[in-house]
Amino acid sequence: MTNHDQDIIIKIIDGDTNAFSVLVDRYKDLIFTLTLRMLKNREEAEEVAQDAFIKAFKSIDKYKGDSKFSTWLYRIAYNSSLDRIKKNTKFNNNVAIDEYSAHEVKTIENAYDALEQKERHETIKYCLNKLPSKDSFMLTLYYFDELSLEEISDVTGIKANNIKVKLFRARKKLATILKKELDNETIVSYGTTYRTAL
């Protein structure tokens, strides 16, 4: 938790409820992104993100500071999303894992990296949206928000060693989707480049 977050939380607990809006402004985009990764539906994600902030506000006095405030908030958003998923089976989706080798996954990722930044951003958003909810959530935390395995464990309640395995499997699923989106000739050329560099 940053000192700034801590100062704001102290103000809220002391009765300055308006100070909570600072935390909302700071984390609303990130929380919405995470709920969207889970729910794949903008309206549902907005509702669950709002619900997560309401839950956080109501239980702010229970926050003990043993993890970063953002991690605590992610956990609330994650659990709120899971609750919504359990109530609605339309959020369940599966991606078969093609048996790519580590080299093949790397080749596909290299080809993806060659895309223009804007195109890359849109492609990854599209592909993440096709992953199962928990996979896209964890990949977002690890690669985009740069949380450690231990921090993701705090958010999800899954052991760090299991997170590592799940991330590897999620990357393989993402490679499966990326391969379908990328031009095959691009992948082949990057495979050649990659092998030459070894």
Image (tube, rainbow, N blue to C red):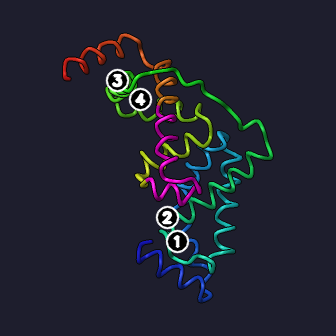
| Residues rendered magenta in the picture | 149-171
Q: Mark 3 = which residue? A: 103
Q: Residue 35, relative to residue 109: is it above or below?
A: below
The picture quadrant where one finds residue 88 is top right
For mark 4, give the secondary structure.
Answer: helix
Name the amino acid type tagged 4. Answer: Glu
Q: Residue 26, relative to residue 162: is it above or below?
A: below
Measured as percent of width and height from the top left, residue 160 is found at 48, 53
Please tell me which residue lies in front, 7 or 156: 156
For mark 1, give the secondary structure.
Answer: helix
Residue ID at (47%, 68%): 68
Q: Mark 2 = which residue? A: 26
Q: Distance between the residues labelled 2 and 4?
A: 27 Å
Crowding around mark 3 (Cα neighbors within 10 Å: few <14, some 14 to 19, many 20+) is: few
- The mark found on residue 175 in the picture is none
Q: Residue 7, relative to residue 39: is it above or below?
A: below
The picture quadrant where one finds residue 134 is top right
- The mark found on residue 22 in the picture is 1
Residue ID at (42%, 45%): 143
Measured as percent of width and height from the top left, residue 74 is found at 56, 59
Name the amino acid type tagged 2. Answer: Arg
Q: Earlier in the sequence, mark 3 or mark 1?
A: 1
Q: How far apart are marks 3 and 1 (CA)?
A: 45 Å
Q: Is residue 162 magenta?
A: yes
